[in-house]
Amino acid sequence: MPPKKRHSGVTQSREPKPDADSASSPDKQDSPELSEKKHREKDAKFVSLCKSLHVSDLVCDRAWALWKTVQESMDKVPGSQERLWGACLFVIVTDMDIGCFTVTQVLKAVSLNLKQFLVVVRQLDVNLDTISTKVNSALTRLEKKYDVMLALYQRFEKTCKNIFVLTPDGKVRETTRTCWTMFLLSKGRALQMEDDLVISFQLLLCTLELFIKRCSPDQLQPLYQSAISKVQTPSTRTSRRSLSKAKSRPVEPEVDAQLLETLCKDNECNIEEVKNVYQTSFMAFLESVDLSKSTDFPQVNFINQQYEEHYLKSRDIDGRLFFDGDESVLPPKVEISQVERTPKKNQPDEDGPMIPPQTPIRAAMTSIKMLRGDLPPNGDQPSTALATYFKNCTVDPTQDVQKRLETLGQVFSQKFGEAVGPRCVVYGRQRFALGVRLYYKVMEAMLKSEEKRLSVQNFSKLLNDSTFHTSLLACSLEVVMATYEESSFKNGGSDQTGTNLCFPWILNVLSLPAFDFYKVIESFIKAEQTLSKDIIKHLETCENLIMERIAWRTDSPLFELLKQEHANAAPEPAETPASLNQPLQHNHTAADLYLSPMRPGLRGLPPHSPATPPQPPAASQSTSQAPCQVPRLPKSNSLSLFYKKLYRLAYTRLKTLCSYLLSSNPELEPIIWTLFQYTLQHEYELMRDRHLDQLMMSAMYAICKVKSVDLRFKSIVSSYKNLPNTNQETFKNVLITEGHYDSIIVFYNQVFMQKLKTNILQHASTRPPPLSPIPQIPRSPYKFPNSPLRVPGSNNVYISPMKSSRMSPGIMTPRSRMLVSIGESFGLGNRFQKINQMVNSSERSHKRTMDPGSTLKPLKRLRFDMDGQDEADGSKPGGDSTLIQKLTEMSSTWSRMQEQKMKEDPEMGDGSQ
């Protein structure tokens, strides 16, 4: 059918919305009809549910068997049976990879929204073996995709209000409905990673551009009327007609640069990136649906039909239901209330810029803007200072650096495109270009720091080390992808390749051992002062994942280092507990770790390092503690630091798990740690292709067993799932023998206990081994330079260093306080008086709130408190100079605050917690 005429709006006729009854099943023709006679022994309502979802007899039988297993395992069935039946059917079809129904169809059949359904499915895992890894991965992917789609629709809804004028005839609503459906279709066609928030949002802006310039002016707000005025000029139309006649090459849809720029500016999106998305993915999509040559509205029925086919094939969520406010895709009320509580602006009587709500898309756009702003504009080449460092080297590394970047750039871009979607290689080039700019910037900062520390300018050995360069580049690229939210750690990360860009994807792409990558992380964070707190935590999580499992893969250089250490080690006593009870402080830089892997002497050796002898029997403990003067061979800096961090991470996780399970037996924690630490030190081969937490859970079970404490593995893994960044793979699929995996229980019986039986039984004897020193768990070793620090002697005054000149007080956190930015214009002078009034009135406000007869009223100016409490330190109003005195103290107390920062907030502990 020919498209409708321009400016006539979209056609009013459209296909009815699909639901559980009307929509066809994805594989209905391939599945035999359910025979009710074969299922007479089953509940009639269950059989009816199966029939409505078009499942086969085999699926019906397996889902019923799963339901009976779950029913027997549960003391009490939570909620209605029908909802659990739907969950059982979902689990079975996912495991069997059969397309009987879509997610939306099962949601409607059991009257649940998506978030509720996810909870119900996870309730089935009562015995921790009901839900397979495949199902769990599907749930995680589904949840992330839903979150992204919800964020996109909420932004779409808000943006449309700024663009369109609602008309009584409903044409604008039909236009926006078709626009949303076309966006969903383009996202499904263009991206393999449909949960990529940033590229999806850029595609949404491209789709909006296409529809806006086809609307009549009276349907648009003034800003967008003026933005598309040039599209209406005769010359533009002539150009389009002439292009349509050119048959020698495909016609490219005309992009209105002014309109696209207005959209990008209004949505804080980088215009160049959106143009690239338009010219690659979006234009390819338009050609695939034969819309690249049309200047009219896309036909409603055609777009609906195309999306219907995509939705049924993907067996996923019907994204069109967001537009209709369907209950199956509505967010939970708690999430809605949190959004409503987000401060949208300052109080009316306060000066300063408006503060917008921090939605997922706004947060992503802000992070990207800050990353780009912090990088030098011409940073794709070494700066003059960095080029000088290269020239000062005995062997100039410039050419090698450029060749390496060229080679790795091609590899990265190609792999990125394969993972994200067709024609997405260009986005990989964009990410890589940003990564190179960050790589050069951080390298220069590192070299300046090393020059200051060592008073040398010739870094030939370091700058000609390929591993150092690749590691630094990998870290820069990981920061870029984390900023674009293409690398995240939901559900503990993943080792899978393909469509998952999550760490350690970058290591696989660059063929970089994880142990080498870990060496650069801490120096990178210290050198790049503009990293956000979220990015620092992301890199710290990368480091933890390396220590937990990635560095323990068979091909890791870590094992060769450990082998050398044990082969060269002489008998040496364990270090005193005091050495482990110190905060993790060291002077090692990336240069030390990459270029000086060996160093003489005992200083800095990790407590109970792998070089020390095995834990002796109880009878010889007294003699083994005597000092030993046997000469030592050089030790590895990188291995020493690795084990120091490993011990602290291991003990932090053990301590948390013990708090869940052994609060009534606190004496067992140091005993479990002793066995755990001994295993890491002397039986490190047990870590090969395994996870740190597998040894932790096994050690806990072993000690509880010999100490006659009733603690079962079911209880251990149930509590373990509550730890941060955990994955059920850790206890469901443990390496037993080469190529054979089984549960944590089988690993304990066949591997762990067999290897450590003698040592475990020693803890049940009357003369057990001495306890290992307990590591002190300091705050994260990575300081957050932009986090507020408390002024000494004050409970309610905090200061933060200025991040950059682009950060005005209005967009700095915390948003719920009045902010003073030293070194930047504060606005009107009377704001200082307002702050003084706030401080001076805090005592009176506190008294007023304690009066039961008074009525609480929201304060127009927020108080200086961090926990929502009034200041109650007994201070009296001190006139207009109260805050001025506090501000005067700030510059003189900064150094004392840095020391205090290391001592305060012990609850921060390890960053992974």
Image (tube, rainbow, N blue to C red):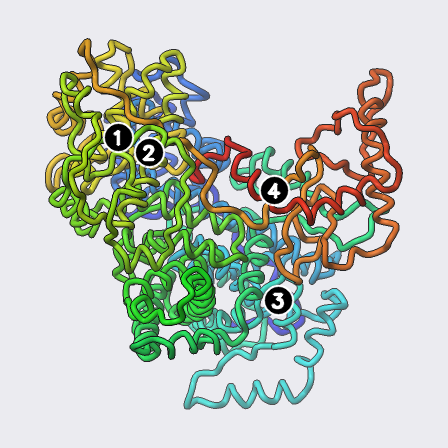
Q: Quadrant of residue 878?
A: top right
The CA span between labels 2 and 3 is 46 Å
Disc number at residue 650? 2
Residue 29 % position (x, y)? 29, 48
The CA span between labels 1 and 4 is 36 Å
* Disc 2 residue type (three-letter): Ala
Residue 451 % position (x, y)? 43, 65
The CA span between labels 4 and 3 is 45 Å
Q: Foreground mark, 4 or 3?
A: 4
Residue indicated by mark 1? 677
Viewer-nearest residue: 888 or 425: 888
- Mark 1 Cα shell of 10 Å, populated few (<14), some (14-19), many (≥20): many
The CA span between labels 2 and 4 is 31 Å
Element marked by disc 1: helix
In primary-sequence order, the first of circles 4 and 3 is 3
Residue indicated by mark 4? 896
Point 23% across, 47% down: residue: 635
User: Mark 2–mark 3 contact, CB under 8 Å?
Assistant: no
